Image (spheres, helix red, strand yellow):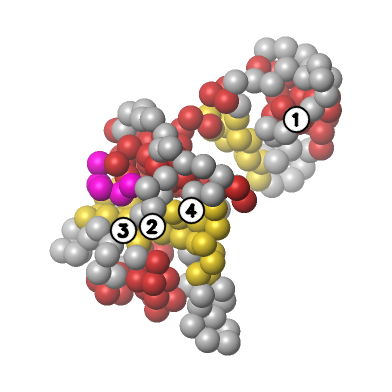
Amino acid sequence: VLDGAAGLAEHAGAGRGGARHEAGAAAGAAGVAGDEQTEVAPVAERVLAVAVGGGEERVEAAVGVADDVAPRVVLDERGVGAGDRVGVMVPQGVEVVTAHLGSFRAGAVTVPLSVKFGPEAVVYRLRHSGARLLVIDGANFGRVRQALAGVETLRTVLVVGDAPADEGDPAEVLPFDEVHAATESADTADTTANSPAIIIYTSGTTGLPKGALHAHRIL
């Protein structure tokens, strides 16, 4: 998120060592086709820029697209493969992007969970989807930890932030950051536009929440 096309173009040009037409550079940095003369950087060189705050107060983080490889390996090592469900309950940030893209590359199906959900809502969606792995931040893990014992399919929990103390959880509990740093690259799964990618649940205001399965074509 930058201040308009000019700011995005300036950021893209500086990061990739070359001046470009503003509109073309903005499109290239965002992964969108620009004019015919636009030079699009290779995937490994593209970045995700996150700006927080306004005025002079600004925080930026640049993350290579290839960083989503780490969770891909983690899923393989824990028996999560094509079609398996991965819950994601983390406040908006780099870890959300990493968890989703890593799962998509593995052919797994993500289940986004609002950080505002209580234990009952989380457990229902994880059980209904048959989730085998959950990525969650430390604060929310503390709120729903005991309830997760009711999710029979859950095998692994990756916690973003401080690693929690061992409390004999039925599922394996690991720190997300340490696992991410220890992994190596891996090939992507053989998916198509019609392969399942993500389950979005309804609010459940008129009954039990219903999960809508969407394919890779919507990403």
Using the image, determine if residue 152 lies above or below residue 108. Answer: below
Compare marks 3 and 1 and give the one earlier in the sequence: 1
Does residue 93 belong to the magenta stretch? no
Q: Earlier in the sequence, mark 3 or mark 4?
A: 3
Nearer to us: label 3 or label 4: 4
Residue at the extreme top of the image, as rendered: 18
**Mark found first going from the N terminus, 2 or 1:** 1
Q: Which residue is mark 3?
A: 132
Say if mark 1 contacts mark 4, CB within 8 Å.
no
Observer-nearest of 186 and 116: 186
For disc 2, the marked residue is 85
**For marks 1 and 4 on the same chain, the one whose residue lies earlier in the sequence:** 1
Determine contact: label 3, label 4, CB under 8 Å: no
What is the quadrant of residue 76 in the picture?
top left
Q: Tell me the quadrant of the picture where the N terminus can be found.
A: top right
Of residues 165 and 16, the one drawn nearer to the viewer in this rendering: 16
Residues marked 2 and 3 touching at CB (< 8 Å): yes
Q: Residues within 10 Å of mark 2 (few under 14, many from 20)?
A: many
Q: Residue at x 77, y 24 (%)?
A: 25
Which residue is rendered at x = 36% and y = 54% of the image? 84
Circle on res. 33: 1
Secondary structure at numbered mark 4 = strand
According to the image, label 4 marks what residue? 196
